[in-house]
Image (spheres, rainbow, N blue to C red):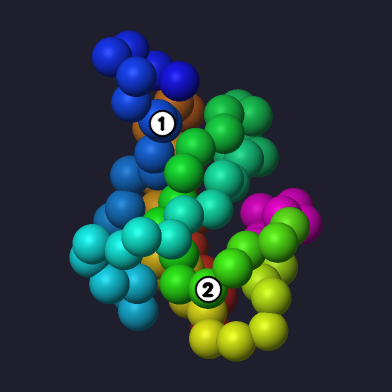
Amino acid sequence: MTRKGRKPTWKILDRGDVPDPTLEFAMLTCLGCGAEAELPVVGLAIAQIHQGLVFDIGPHAVPKRIQCRRCRRFYETGE
């Protein structure tokens, strides 16, 4: 946890199909610096493989473009 009990989050640059606010989050680790933070998602993320998430059966979505708050590295979904 960070200061004042807040959990670390990714900086969302483009939410894509993920509504705001959302109640579902997945922990995602940055490949650049190793920081782990919550990412808003649609669906149940069950694993992380490299910089991708594996979801359970059903509808799912992740933000289109995010940035690590620690090392400032950008990630975006490929279409």
* Residue in the picture at 53% in, 73% down: 43
Q: In the picture shown, does residue 78 fall above or below 32?
A: below
State the image coordinates of residue 58 (x, y, percent, origin top left): 60, 87
For this rendering, which residue is in front, 8 or 52? 8
Residue at numbered disc 1: 8
* Residue in the picture at 27% in, 72% down: 19
Q: Earlier in the sequence, mark 2 or mark 1?
A: 1
Q: Is residue 20 left or right of residue 78?
A: left
State the image coordinates of residue 71 (x, y, percent, origin top left): 47, 28
Q: Which segment did they paint magenta?
A: 48-53
The label shown at residue 22 is none
Q: What is the secondary structure assignment of the residue under circle 1?
A: loop
Direction left: furthest residue: 20
Residue at numbered disc 2: 43
Visible in this render: residue 17? yes
Q: Is residue 50 left or right of residue 33?
A: right
Look at label 2 and name its amino acid.
Answer: Gly
